[in-house]
Amino acid sequence: MTAQLNPRGDVAVLVPAAGAGVRLGPGAPKALRLLAGEPLLVHAVRRIAAAPSVHTIVVAAPATEVEAVRAMLAPVAPVAPVTVVPGGAERQESVAAALAAVPAGPEIVLVHDAARALTPPHLVESVAAAVRDGHDAVIPVLPVVDTIKEVDAAERVLGTVDRSALRAVQTPQGFRRSVLIAAHRSAGDALTDDAGLVEKQGIAVTCVPGSELALKITRPFDMALAEHLLTTGA
Ligand code: C5P
């Protein structure tokens, strides 16, 4: 499906959504599990599409679900319509497949996990704004609240890490388009985020404040929390 383009925006958002969701227990691929009666991916895309800077959205779906995901998302994002491509075996492959499908135009590319389904549109805007202001790579972060210990294979404590210098990293992560393309082109081992690829290129990555609503829905407790947040207006 070819996306119609939203002429208002200068941002493409890639949504890797091809994960199995093993940590949620048996069931459908994670992005298709229901949260308050709708798939996680629908919640995520609806919020992305509500951000005024978004020009187009490219979803990497589970390979067997591409048609179903197209049908599901067609009514969700009428202003910044969605292109759906098959994802890969690893998250990094899914992002690369989505990146290859971005149409000409947007010079800012955000990568946003479908699993962060309640991410507010203002976080999409603040990450995009920081890239527009001249930063090559931008990540939303929260301070780490727990004390962090490093352990060995036998779970013996090796030391305590200074948490004041640590940040928990969320998505959407934002990039100048050429920077993300170059980082993926030279990608080696699979990493868990895209900023990691950019760091390996020696390019500075800038932090902006994240949002507690951008929590990553990973385990059954997170689903319950997200349901509660939705019923209280998230
Ligand atoms: O595996 P993890 O929970 O870190 O996945 C983060 C995001 O990457 C999820 O939205 C998931 O659907 C996506 N993913 C993907 N392709 C894979 C694995 C994960 O698009 N092969």
Image (cartoon, rainbow, N blue to C red):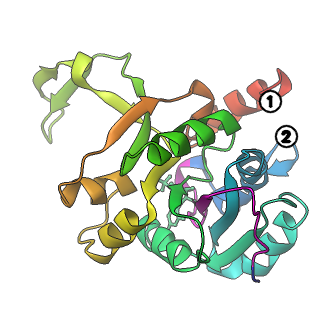
Residue 151 is marked as: none
Residue nearer the viewer, 105 or 122: 105
Farthest residue, direction left: 158
Main SS of residues in magenta? loop
Q: Which of the two labelled residues, at mark 2 and mark 1, occupies the earlier sequence position?
A: 2
Residue nearer the viewer, 64 or 187: 187
Is residue 90 a member of the stretch shown in magenta?
A: no
- The residue that label 2 is drawn on is 36
Mark 1, secondary structure of its residue = helix
Q: Which residues are magenta?
A: 3-23
Classify residue 56 by image quadrant: bottom right
Name the residue located 74 percent from the left edge and 56 percent from the top edge.
8
Q: Position of residue 102 (x, y in %)?
A: 58, 74
Whether 42 is drawn above or below 91: the answer is above
- The residue that label 1 is drawn on is 230
Is residue 16 a member of the stretch shown in magenta?
A: yes
Q: Is residue 26 left or right of residue 146?
A: right
Mark 2, secondary structure of its residue = loop
Name the residue located 51 percent from the left edge and 77 percent from the top edge.
97
Residue nearer the viewer, 77 or 231: 77
Residues under labels 2 and 1: Cα distance? Answer: 8 Å
Whether 57 is drawn above or below 129: the answer is below
